[in-house]
Image (cartoon, rainbow, N blue to C red):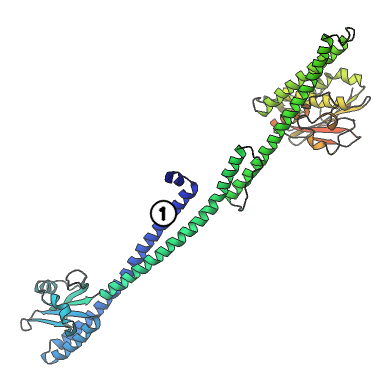
Amino acid sequence: MGKKSFNTLFSRMLSTYLAIILLIIFLLGITISGMFKSQYMTENENELRREAAEINRVIVTQYVDAEKRAVAKDTLRTTMRKYDAMLQLYFIDSAFGKVILRDELNEAKWDPLCDADLSADASAIIMGNGEIEISSDRFTSGNIPIMTLSRQITTTEGEVIGAMFFHTDVSRTNDSIRKVYLDVLLSACIAVILAILAVTYITSRMTKPIVDMNNAINRFSRGEYEARVNITSHDEVGQLGQSFNEMANEINALEQSRRSFVANVSHELRSPLTSMRGFLEAMQDGTIASEDQPKYLDIVINECKRMTGMVNDLLDLARIESGQYELKLEPFDLNELVIRTVLTFEARINAKHIDVNMDFDAEHTTVEADQSQIAQVIRNLVDNAIKFSPDGGALTMRIVTDKKLAIMSVIDQGEGISPDDLPYVFDRFYKAEKAHTPSGSSSGLGLSIVKRIIEQHGQTIKAESQLGKGATFTFTLKLYEQQGRPKANPAQRR
């Protein structure tokens, strides 16, 4: 259970941040404590150096004089009392002997140190280079921490006459340092508590949107497509939440489209199959007379052809949308392709007495695209326009160039499309009286296939219409090379 809890993003972020903060506080504590200790000890050493110089002056000017020695001792005792210290003096002249001066008030305190013989150390100092040495561990006095300054005693002329040992009790200095340690430790503990609270709050705020997204994903997996993430920030996590909501909207719309698609396909297949079955059973049991059977057989065959066309359209649409069809881009003359395609509809055009206008702004318009796919686009648009055009109407095929694009429009003079239906003409199965095709004559997939093909080429297609004034379908293609704009030829009519 503990291992599983540590695997959560919240626990890992919390532990990582806390570990870093604790390490930083620990290092800062050690650094600050060391700085304070160094400062205290430096100040004590500097003060000892100044006082040692004063003691040297008193010894040279007063102590070596027998008449002034008593006054010198009083002065030195006062100094020792001030620093709670002890002074040991060693001289070269054997007449002086070994003299030990100490504060009488601290006699018992300094007894262990007074009994120590420092003659050898004094001889080394006298024979040395005269540098002042400060040590905290040379001597001990019971349980009292001691700092000792040792130096030569020199006259104003620079003559070395002896050595001194200036011992001071650094208990109060150590107490001050320990107090600094405790203050730093207390501050570190407070900082740790505040850091835990702050990191816990910040980490929870950072991970909450991710937890919400995980919960929303789990709801999505159970079919709750209305689940969304509540966005409270505009940072990277907030942008991720926004992207998730947009993805959820797309998935929800796709799911609605899928359900509608399945329902429409089921309806489109079930209705003609039911009709065909009824006609066939009626012919089988003799309900339809033998002389009438050819008429109903034509109806059945036409329905079979319509369903075959719808299934083919569905396969084409599925292949395009799944990306299985790879475009074969090549340069070709769009004008020529349009003329060839329109010629395949000659019988239907003549039957409805439709005038076809070829309005091209250049003799040749070379585009770079998949020729077979664009031919299917033109066929679907022309087929759609012929179906909706009235007898004696006009069909215009217009091609113009603009910079690097060829713009083609298919224009009819039908009844047009209502503004409410216009946004949905490219949807699958949006047809019959609601779209630009007569009821029952199309699978409702032609315009949807057209849009997918154009989008696969990275181009756009749009529909424009006004009721009573026909409809215009316009799409773009990439020019193979920059086209000039020669003088337009007169419109060709068929």
Can residue 371 be seen here? The reply is: no
Where 64 falls versus 16 (above or below)?
A: below
Can residue 332 be seen here? The reply is: yes
Horizontal side, residue 409 vs residue 188: left or right: right
> Residue 359 in the image: x percent, y percent?
85, 29
Pick the front one: 69 or 403: 69
Circle 1 crowding by C-alpha within 10 Å: few under 14, some 14–19, many from 20: few
Pick the front one: 172 or 65: 172
> Residue 437 in the image: x percent, y percent?
84, 28
Residue at image position (68%, 29%) is 321
The answer to which image quadrant residue 109 occupies is bottom left
> Residue 25 in the image: x percent, y percent?
40, 60
Residue that extends furthest to the bottom in the rendered view of this protein: 67
Residue that extends furthest to the left in the rendered view of this protein: 94
The answer to which image quadrant residue 117 occupies is bottom left
- For disc 1, the marked residue is 19
The answer to which image quadrant residue 225 occupies is top right
Horizontal side, residue 407 vs residue 164: left or right: right
Horizontal side, residue 463 vs residue 165: left or right: right
Pick the front one: 343 or 87: 87
Give the quarter of the figure containing the N terminus. Answer: top left
Numbered-mark total:
1
Q: Secondary structure at mark 1?
A: helix
Where 143 falls versus 28 (above or below)?
A: below
Residue that extends furthest to the right in the rendered view of this protein: 392
> Residue 120 in the image: x percent, y percent?
9, 72
Give the quarter of the figure containing the C terminus. Answer: top right
What amino acid is found at the position of numbered circle 1 in the picture? Answer: Ala
Where 435 falls versus 25 (above or below)?
A: above
